[in-house]
Image (cartoon, rainbow, N blue to C red):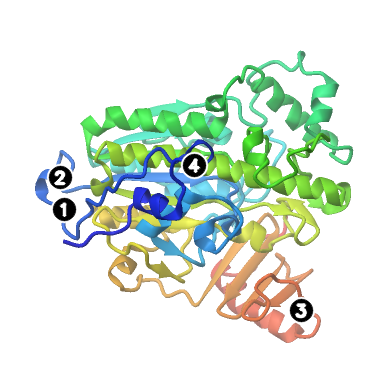
Amino acid sequence: MREYLTRKDFLKVAGAGAAGAAVLGATGCGTLAKSFTQVPDEYLPKGGSKVNVIVVMVDSLRRDHVGAYSNSWIKTPNLDALAKQSLLFTRPYPESIPTIPARRAIHTGVRTWPFKDWHPVSDDGFKPYGWAPVPADQVVLAEVLSAEGINTNIVTDTLHLYRAFYDFQRGFDTFDYIRGQERDQYRPLMSVSDARVDAVTVSGNIPDMRDKARQYLANTSNRKTEEDWFAPRVFMSAGEYLKHIKEAQPFFLLVDSFDPHEPWDPPRKYVDLYGDPDYSGREPTVPNYSDASWITEGELERMRALYAGEVTMTDAWLGHFLERIEDLGLAETTLLILLSDHGVGLGEHDDTGKPYWALYPELTDIVFMMRHPHGKGAGKKSDYYASTHDVAPTIFSLLDIEKPEQMEGTDLSPIFEGGDPDQRRDHFTLGYNNYVWTRDERYVMFSTNTGAEAKLYDVSEDPGMRKNLAGKHPEMVKRIFAEYVLKDAGGPLPNY
């Protein structure tokens, strides 16, 4: 019998028990070591040999803000404990950015970049290339699973997932859409004074960000306790779902948390872990998507504390959800995949938010881990370039379901056994609006679709990407653009 370290074991060893429970979400520190190399038949879900599947999407979570990825100052004990039980990808990237393209890839297994079929299709003010509904001619993950008799469910506060226009509801049997995040026109604005907006913005914020803050303040005006924040509501609802759908196994549950996306306004106890407890100034809860000239150094420091606090709050309530999985006896029969869609800039390269041109690690580097129900791969790391469009093919493989022909992603499950995926990836490419990014073992290069504004970094020596080598090596830039970007795109890129 082979056991692996559970979340509870990790929290006990890490000392995040009684003293840290209130802040870090640890609800117990007992030992639960029930994961075997081979699960007995009586423990398998009803309906056959298929395991359950839970996918947790955490929006805007930066890789460098998670302890399991060598961060030493952000408190993420629950993510760290999950990583100890999981196969951890050290070089995962979204196949495209931002929210909608990244999620389309997860649901369809198809690359959205290079955006060759894109055109503006709505009145939504945010229209980066690839920001479009799920194509009608593409089958989605939940549809295939539902056709196989698997109960499909979604819990989310991500606004775009419950806008019917984007068509992410396809294939799901049940939905819990938690209203009020960000720009959701959920509650009227009339009661929100300019003074209240001033308190959660700074003088450099553009009108659009003040409008975002105003709508968010209206939506959250009835909050009283921490349980009324969005991450708690999402993960508590997901835990309640488990109580019911465990009777209809096998099931698929998608938990899509918009936190730690801005606005960053976690309860003060989380912010005080990283910022000045005596701070009394205006709070920079929403970043301009631009260079950092709009914000002072002191405000930028505060914004980083707000984001870190939001990450820790999200981790705490993720911990309650993970605890529920264990308490209901589902950990040994459930494949759990957790990933983020992109990060966010906090001034590291003089950029804030998610501007198209700032394809630095703080924006491109995501979190990706998979916990096998039999404990395979627990504690192991892989430097394979795993991506968002690999999620659906991997799930189908582990459930012994034939992958739809449309799917371009690869099955990551051989890595659990020490093998290699079918797709050999010696480099990776991604796109964000009219910018492209690519990396291999040594170099990262990004530019516009035409190759202009190119930046080149030797990440083997300069992982923080501080020294731009493009001016010294123009021929290398051209070669990487031709051999990686244009080859992967299948020809010239669109330049709308």
Give the residue number, with chain letter if any, for mark 4. 19
What residue is pinned by disc 3? 470
Q: Quadrant of residue 94?
A: bottom right
Residue 244 screen position, x and y as percent: 28, 27
Q: Is residue 54 above or below residue 489?
A: above
Residue type of the residue flagged with mark 2: Tyr
Distance (Cα) linking label 1 and label 2: 7 Å
Please state which of residues 392 and 263 is positioned toward the viewer in this rendering.
Answer: 263
Which residue was labeled with disc 2? 43
- Mark nearest the camera among 4 and 3 is 4
Horizontal arrangement in the rendering, residue 152 relative to residue 234 (left or right): left
The earlier-in-sequence mark between 2 and 3 is 2
Q: Total marks drawn? A: 4
Q: Position of residue 122 (x, y in %)?
A: 65, 35
Amino acid type indicated by mark 1: Val
Q: What amino acid does circle 4 point to? A: Ala
Horizontal side of residue 82 vs 231, given as left or right:
left
